[in-house]
Amino acid sequence: MVWVEIKVTLASELVDPTSYLFNKYGTGLVTQQLNDNMIECTTYVLKSNKTELNQIDVGLGLLKKILPVFSLKKRFVKETDWKEYWKQHFKILHISSNLIIQPSWLSKKSHLNQTSIIIDPGLAFGTGHHPTTLMCLELLEKCAKSFNSLLDLGTGSGILAITAAKLGIDNIIALDTDENSIKSAKENAKINKVSSKIDLYLGTIPDTRLHKKRFDIITANISAEVIEEKAKTIFILLKENGRFFAAGFMNEKAKRLKNILLNIGFVLIKSHENGEWTTLELSK
């Protein structure tokens, strides 16, 4: 298959709408901080998906009118090129002394008390290197031993769901609206020998399959706009005294989203920041 790589360099205030656009119409999302104000965002769209390519072009055109400081590059890549890209840029990541994320093509012997998560991102988002994913992994490591069920919204490569399973959580449901992500997450769950703990569904909430279920932890590493849209359903699905990790947005979006979540009934435990990015740790 041939993909179109879409790479934009833009001011930090445009990252949230760009991420939303790329998540909605693209496959995968990679962000890289270039300097204090400029960020590079990359996504991939099948060359044959003309509608999605057009929607991204229209969206980027509107954003460029808002803030002209903006560059756009496109190129055709084969699916094998994507895999080679990750092999060049995805290295072993130490979340803590007891938790590491490593690509499937690199081997590392873990020590006795160390949890190793093996990830092959394929065409999915989620390696642990992005600040929002990193913060969610740190929170999971801190909370996992106290809880036994988790709902992962926008699972991508499955990194958060798989980490939760390997940290001891037994009942996990992970959702994503992208078929490639579900495929990648299933493969990664199998590699990590946790497939029996994770149910992977194509879709999003509300979902009739979750109608009577309630969760100790809910993770949503997506975007401020999607979290706002799904917030009331997330509140219903979260158990009393459970944890909600809201992530995937930049610092300037945090205050508005925090106030929306507090008005629904969530209780803020702590707002975590890593560079330009925020993760909200909340309870019910």
Image (tube, helix red, strand yellow):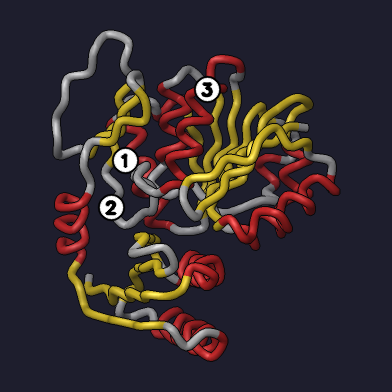
Helix, strand or loop status at disc 2:
loop
Helix, strand or loop status at disc 3:
helix
In the depicted structure, whether residue 53 falls above or below residue 86: below
Q: Nearer the viewer, mark 2 or mark 1?
A: 2
Asked whether the residues under the numbered discs 2 and 1 touch, taking CB atoms below 8 Å apart as contact, a structural biologist would say yes
Q: Earlier in the sequence, mark 2 or mark 1?
A: 2
Q: Where residue 30 sits in the image (x, y, percent)? A: 36, 60
Say which quadrant the N terminus sits in: bottom left
Answer with left or right where residue 24 lies relative to residue 214. Answer: left
- Residue 165: name its quadrant: top left
Q: Earlier in the sequence, mark 2 or mark 3?
A: 2
Q: Where residue 78 sits in the image (x, y, percent)? A: 18, 69
- Residue at coordinates 20% horizontally, 52% vertically from top-left? 89
Label 2: how many Cα within 10 Å (few below 14, some 14–19, many 20+): many
Say which quadrant the C terminus sits in: top right
In the depicted structure, whether residue 129 falls above or below residue 254: above
Helix, strand or loop status at disc 1:
helix
Q: Nearer the viewer, mark 2 or mark 3?
A: 3
Label 3: how many Cα within 10 Å (few below 14, some 14–19, many 20+): few
**How far is disc 2 from disc 3 in space, using C-alphas?**
28 Å
Label 1: how many Cα within 10 Å (few below 14, some 14–19, many 20+): some
- Residue 129: name its quadrant: top left
Label for residue 142? 3
Residue picked out by circle 1: 187
Residue picked out by circle 2: 122
